Image (cartoon, rainbow, N blue to C red):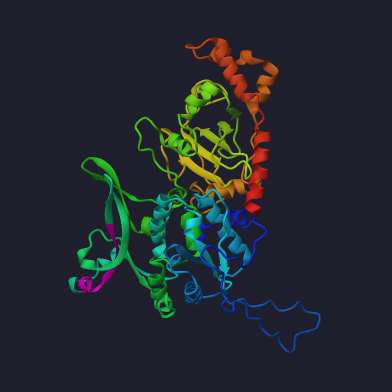
Amino acid sequence: MSRFLPPCLAAALLAVAGWEGERGGASGPAVEVAVPVVVPTAPPATQPPESAPMPREQRLATPGEAVAVALEDARRIPPADLPFTRYVFVQSGQSEDFQALSHAVQLISRSAVTSRPAVVGGIVARIDLRWYAPTADDLQEWLDLWEDFQFDSSFSKLRTRDELALLGEAARQTIVVPTWKRSWAKRGDKWVRAGRELVGKPLADLKDVVVIRSNTPTAEAAGLSKLQAAVGSLVPVVEVRYFLGRALSTIKDRDKVKVDGKDVERENVFSTVWGGRYYEFKGIRKSQVKGRTDLDQLLFDRGILEKFEILFERLRSDGRVIQFISRVTGKPRDVIYFALPSAHLDEASPVCFITRDVRDRDVDHGDRVFKSAVKTRPRAYEVLLTDRNGHIAYALYGEEQQLVDEAASEVVGDGTVPPPNTPRLQAARSCVSCHGPHDGWQPMDGDLRDVVRGAGPDIFGDLADKNKPIFDTVDRLAGQVRGDASKALRRAREDNAAVVLK
């Protein structure tokens, strides 16, 4: 599981201060349960007096102990709060790992406020999902998404498709797979989900099964079935590395098949067990409106109600940074930045930066933004914006402004991934790894601004849009590049540092 948490990401996530070990929440007070995690060893009797002290041996907590701690805590939670209560097992018990978890849940939160998980028994964090998914629709989506963590091998024994194919018909009839059965109710002219219950079905009655799970004997002996029944979930507790690995990832690598001449994605073992869920938790979605791109949808959900290119062509309130060589891609880069209405001013100065990038093979004049600044031909987009709770949200888009799970390798790779691992760049993990050392926002230089400062606006004359007056184009471009993005970035870094500290 450590392959899903690069060292640079861990360092970025751990840069959080001010953790309070015990905090009561909406689900009730934290409960202290005596679970020893550090056992000192006695030094040898013949140890020389001037030698270095013997290191302390650390015994990591077990998944069974995590279940016992969570079950004891759940008994003290009001019944009305239990369906929204979940636990995360932090095996090391170290405060830095709890801080990393706290920062991660803020990054995927849809809420306008910051809420830290409560530490229980020194090895478990209690999370009330209502603090991170405040609306009814958000909460329902989070409850459904949380079930995807059921394949955490710390608490589950997994049997994959290839293993199941070896079973005979008699065995397939005896294996019972727990599945959710939904109930629906009609409200007005719409059918809405009214509830769900966990039912068991024989494996033989299920089609296209990719992987099934069952409780591990250790977790079961500690009371996992009781905890599952108490909170109404197959995943009352999840291990922190597994949680971080999927909640901060977008890569799914589903199989692509043809159905009636159309490309359709289907789940496989990797996508089911390891597939990223960052976009889903964050509420970053594809557009369902004709004429609205996925990038437009992201900004629409953050308060910009028309295509951003049209909006800022009219208002001319955006800034622009044109780089000859980007520190991130190693190629020319065009960056648009502007203010957002979607975050609280007392938490942060809401800002959005959208990079427009090219591929390795894009070398003609029209592909080099500093040579053709009026009409660019971007092949990929990266978006960083201040979200509702003041933390940064991340998203990647392709040439048609379609939401993508990872950046094309010919555009950019994740330079923080050590070889020989594949440097696939994805949101949010790669973005945090790259931008984290700079308080969330990478520095960037306006190379074209420095050129224009000496040459004057006539540098744009032969590149003007023929359908517009020359001074219209000159005013537009000069107004964009005259700004200094370092001022906006400095404020954004200060705001991000403050909200992460909080």
Task: Tell me, yes or no, whether the highlighted magenta stretch contains residue 454.
Answer: no
User: Which is more toward the observer, 262 or 367?
Assistant: 262
Residue reaching furthest to the top: 469
**Residue 120 at x, y percent in the picture:** 56, 70
**Number of marks in the rendered image:** 0
Residue at 50%, 27% in the rendered image: 363
Residue reaching furthest to the right: 50
Residue 289 occupies which quadrant of the picture?
top left
User: Which is more toward the observer, 131 or 18?
Assistant: 131
The reply to whether residue 1 is in sight is: no
Residue at 35%, 59% in the rendered image: 269
Work out which quarter of the rendered image holds the C terminus and state it.
Answer: bottom right
**Residue 148 at x, y percent in the picture:** 39, 59
Query: In the image, which residues are magenta?
Result: 171-183
Residue 388 occupies which quadrant of the picture?
top right
The reply to whether residue 189 is in sight is: yes
Lateral position of residue 218 relative to residue 443, left or right: left
Residue at 47%, 41% in the rendered image: 396
Residue at 51%, 40% in the rendered image: 412
Lateral position of residue 457 relative to residue 295, left or right: right
**Residue 303 at x, y percent in the picture:** 49, 36
Magenta segment's dominant SS is strand
Q: Is residue 437 above or below residue 76?
A: above
Residue reaching furthest to the left: 169
**Residue 68 at x, y percent in the picture:** 48, 77
User: Which is more toward the observer, 459 or 339?
Assistant: 339
Task: Tell me, yes or no, whether the highlighted magenta stretch contains residue 180.
Answer: yes
